[in-house]
Image (cartoon, helix red, strand yellow):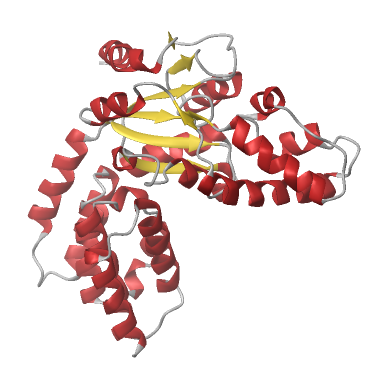
């Protein structure tokens, strides 16, 4: 099988394979990266066809970071850009409208601009308001499972430190560097991080079989919110941790989330990642929901209102609203958005 045939087969997988959202996102990101080094026109066209099939069949264009292609779009031929303009229109992000127009001017024989503009504006209208969530203490409690995995790893390392669920609640919401320093204060930073990375590797495997605790009524809340808002998750966690929460075997509402981002993937602060997701989604009015002071600080950095999930692990100095039960969120968010209009 030639390489272009391999990507054609991938298109079939995207259309009919029944993979989870997180798996499809990872596949899409890999294809995007591969376009940067590929020179064969036939293989490139097959790659863009695969991405097009992925976004049309699975409706996950908002999940994908398209910037690597955007930066070098002029190196791609007409067939590739025909697919790409349609992909851009499915993101619902109005910032791409000038780019679509520019690409269509370069290839005027394909006159689909008005259709793509209409699609983009329609999606943007329905996606302009967003609610982004912290994960731990806000959407689930995995402290017991994570600490079991960490303590097991530490024992394997021949060390004596053992941590409690209360310790884990104190760690959650902090960056990996801060947590490592809190856990192993006498070690140099390089060793602190090595130990914690080992812990998180075991944690991801452990959570695949030992799911965290969702909050009562969470699925109904999320499905209600998804009717009116773009929903996303922004966490300070390592790459791959959010996907443990989005395990379709345990979580029946993974489809409501349009985007996710974490410090472990971008290296950015939580506030910067919030802005990144807002930009990707074309969100103009946004609320961040979290349970710690770090979450409140991140919302302030991003310049958006903060709702405190007081049912979680932490206290905050100030917030726009407070929740004692996640089931209060639809009414609270509606009131807060009404005040933003």
Q: Is residue 42 visible?
A: yes
Residue 327 falls in image quadrant: top left
Above or below 250: residue 29: below
Closer to us: 261 or 75: 261
Relative to residue 241, is residue 246 drawn left or right?
left
Identify the residue shown where x is 52% and y is 32%: 271
Residue 100 falls in image quadrant: bottom left
Identify the residue shown where x is 40% and y is 66%: 32
Q: Is residue 52 visible?
A: no
Farthest right residue in view = 186
Relative to residue 58, is residue 243 drawn left or right?
right
Identify the residue shown where x is 42% and y is 80%: 38
Closer to us: 100 or 153: 153
User: Residue 223, position in %: x, y?
Assistant: 26, 30
Above or below 313: residue 72: below
User: Residue 242, position in %: x, y?
Assistant: 49, 42
User: Residue 172, position in %: x, y?
Assistant: 62, 29
Quarter of the image with the C terminus is top left
Identify the residue shown where x is 59% and y is 12%: 315
User: Residue 5, position in %: x, y?
Assistant: 29, 84
Quarter of the image with the N terminus is bottom left
């Amino acid at each position: 099988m030639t390489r272009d045939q391999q990507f054609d087969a991938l298109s079939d997988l995207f259309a009919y394979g029944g993979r989870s959202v997180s798996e499809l996102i990872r596949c899409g990101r890999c294809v995007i990266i591969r376009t940067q080094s590929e020179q064969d026109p036939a293989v490139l066209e097959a790659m863009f066809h695969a991405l097009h099939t992925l976004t049309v069949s699975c409706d996950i264009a908002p999940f994908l970071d398209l910037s690597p292609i955007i930066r070098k779009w002029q190196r791609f031929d007409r067939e590739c850009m025909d697919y790409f303009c349609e992909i851009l229109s499915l993101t619902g992000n109005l910032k791409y409208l000038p780019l679509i127009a520019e690409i269509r001017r370069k290839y005027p024989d394909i006159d689909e601009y008005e259709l793509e503009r209409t699609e983009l504006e329609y999606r943007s209208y329905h996606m302009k308001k967003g609610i982004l969530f912290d994960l731990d203490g806000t959407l689930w409690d995995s402290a017991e499972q994570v600490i079991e995995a960490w303590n097991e790893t530490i024992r394997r390392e021949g060390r004596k430190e053992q941590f409690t669920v209360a310790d884990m609640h104190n760690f959650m919401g902090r960056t990996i560097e801060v947590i490592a320093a809190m856990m192993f204060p006498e070690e140099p930073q390089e060793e602190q991080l090595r130990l914690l990375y080992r812990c998180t590797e075991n944690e991801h495997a452990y959570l695949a079989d030992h799911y965290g605790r969702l909050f009562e009524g969470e699925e109904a809340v999320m499905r209600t919110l998804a009717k009116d808002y773009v929903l996303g998750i922004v966490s300070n966690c390592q790459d791959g941790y959010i996907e443990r929460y989005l395990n379709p075997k345990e979580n029946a509402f993974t489809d409501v989330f349009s985007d996710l981002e974490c410090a472990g993937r971008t290296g950015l602060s939580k506030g910067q990642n919030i802005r990144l997701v807002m930009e990707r989604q074309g969100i103009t009015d946004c609320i961040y929901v979290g349970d710690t002071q770090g979450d409140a600080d991140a919302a302030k950095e991003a310049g958006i209102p903060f709702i405190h999930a007081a049912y979680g692990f932490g206290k905050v100095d100030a917030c726009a609203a407070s929740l004692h039960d996640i089931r209060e969120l639809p009414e609270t968010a509606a009131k807060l958005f009404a005040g933003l209009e």
